[in-house]
């Protein structure tokens, strides 16, 4: 897998800082968090993950959310340029995260400068919306985030 672009790292770091201000640094995890998923590969490393309060203690020894644990509240993937990478974030990861029961999944796309937000309704993700420009990001789980898409991409 190719290394992340500098832009992708900047975007993920910006979002990490914004969520840390909202929730506290212990509930926000960057790329080092391992997430067990079904299918191949068996593990994913989201660009950003918002964990539950109960995860803080559970992750002290190993930064892995296992099937036996509650799912994280949110995963964010910043799309790496390239057709295979786009397909992985928009299709493969979507299916795996949905299967894990993760309530919210963001696909942050630097190429189109959009943020697609998916919410788990029942057993399937439903598109909350695709946000761009000066749109306010409407997160079902984090309504007080107060974030414009332009801040993410034009910082």
Image (spheres, rainbow, N blue to C red):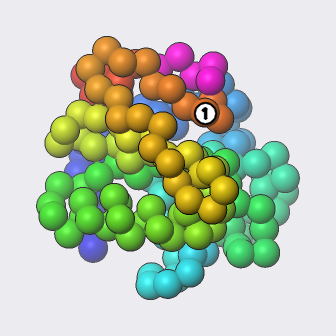
Q: Which residues are magenta?
A: 143-147
Image spot of residue 115 (x, y percent)? 36, 37
Quadrant location, the N terminus: bottom left
Q: Residue at x 81, y 46 (%)?
A: 53
At mark 1, the secondary structure is: loop
Q: Image check: 121 left or right of 107?
A: right
Q: Nearer the viewer, residue 70 or 22?
A: 70
Q: Is residue 60 above or below residue 18?
A: below
Give the x, y percent position of residue 148: 40, 19
Q: Where is mark 1, residue-wise?
A: 140
Decide: is 78 above or below 133. below
In the rendered image, which quarter is residue 93 located in? bottom left
Locate residue 49, reporting x and y percent.
57, 50
Horizontal relation, residue 22 to residue 118: left or right: right
Q: Can residue 57 be seen in this snapshot?
A: yes
In the image, residue 144 lies in the stretch drawn in magenta: yes
Give the residue at x 65% y 35%: 141
Q: How many marks?
A: 1
> Is 132 located above or below residue 63 in the figure?
above
Query: Looking at the figure, which quarter contains the C terminus?
Result: top left
Q: Residues within 10 Å of mark 1 (few under 14, many from 20)?
A: few
């Amino acid at each position: 897998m190719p290394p992340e672009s500098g832009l992708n790292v900047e975007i993920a770091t910006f979002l990490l800082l914004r969520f840390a201000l909202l929730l506290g640094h212990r509930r926000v995890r960057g790329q080092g968090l391992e997430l067990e998923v079904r299918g191949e590969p068996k593990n994913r490393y989201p660009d950003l993950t918002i964990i539950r309060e109960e995860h803080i203690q559970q992750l002290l020894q190993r930064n892995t959310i296992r099937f036996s644990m509650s799912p994280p509240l949110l995963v964010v993937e910043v799309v790496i340029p390239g057709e295979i990478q786009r397909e992985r974030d928009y299709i493969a990861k979507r299916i795996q995260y949905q299967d894990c029961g993760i309530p919210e999944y963001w696909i942050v796309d630097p190429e189109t400068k959009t943020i697609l937000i998916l919410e788990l309704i029942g057993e399937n993700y439903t598109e909350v919306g695709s946000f761009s420009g000066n749109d306010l990001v409407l997160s079902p789980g984090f309504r007080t985030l107060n974030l414009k898409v332009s801040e993410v991409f034009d910082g």
